[in-house]
């Protein structure tokens, strides 16, 4: 059998329009600092730094004009 006749196994794929947002969320997977969370409400933290992300990562996000985490990002990071 030549290479042209070989079939690759099927894989599932996602809509590419959301891939950029998802990859940004996946890269941010660190625990928040305890000072960012008060009264059990994780949404009170309004910056990535308050969520305990490293200075380097905060700088990278700021460079990409991503300054405020979305509620989904806050929950994922937490």
Image (cartoon, helix red, strand yellow):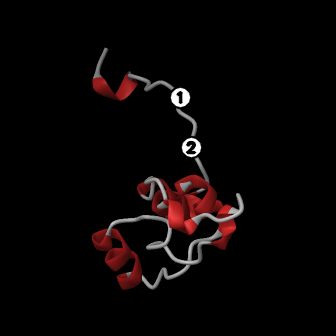
**In the shown orientation, is residue 67 left or right of residue 15?**
left
Name the residue tied to disc 1: 10
* Label annotation for residue 37: none
Disc 2 element: loop
x 59%, y 72%: residue: 45
x 28%, y 71%: residue: 56
Instruction: Judge by depth and name the residue closer to the eye, 36 or 68.
Output: 36
Q: Quadrant of the N terminus?
A: top left
Whether 8 is drawn above or below 41: the answer is above
Q: Nearer the viewer, mark 1 or mark 2?
A: 2
Whether 13 is drawn above or below 61: the answer is above
Label 2, residues with CA under 10 Å away: few <14, some 14-19, many ≥20 = few
State how far apart marks 1 and 2 are (Cα). 10 Å
**In the shown orientation, is residue 54 left or right of residue 45?**
left
Is label 1 in contact with label 2 (beta carbons under 8 Å)? no
Q: Quadrant of residue 12?
A: top right
x 58%, y 62%: residue: 73
Disc 1 element: loop
Q: Quadrant of the C terminus?
A: bottom right
Label 1, residues with CA under 10 Å away: few <14, some 14-19, many ≥20 = few
Instruction: Judge by depth and name the residue closer to the eye, 41 or 14.
Output: 41
Name the residue tied to disc 2: 13
Q: Residue furthest top?
A: 1
x 31%, y 73%: residue: 55
* Residue 65, x across and y down, in percent: 45, 85
Q: Quadrant of residue 72?
A: bottom right
* Residue 30, x across and y down, in percent: 43, 54
* Residue 53, x across and y down, in percent: 40, 65
Instruction: Judge by depth and name the residue closer to the eye, 6 or 32.
Output: 32
Number of numbered discs visible in the structure rendering: 2
């Amino acid at each position: 059998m030549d290479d042209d006749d070989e079939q690759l196994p099927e894989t599932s794929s996602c809509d590419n329009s959301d891939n950029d947002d998802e990859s940004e969320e996946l890269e941010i997977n660190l625990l928040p600092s305890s000072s960012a969370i008060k009264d059990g409400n994780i949404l009170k933290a309004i910056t990535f730094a308050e969520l305990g992300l490293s200075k380097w990562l905060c700088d990278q996000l700021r460079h990409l004009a991503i300054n405020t985490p979305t509620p989904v990002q806050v929950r994922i990071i937490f």
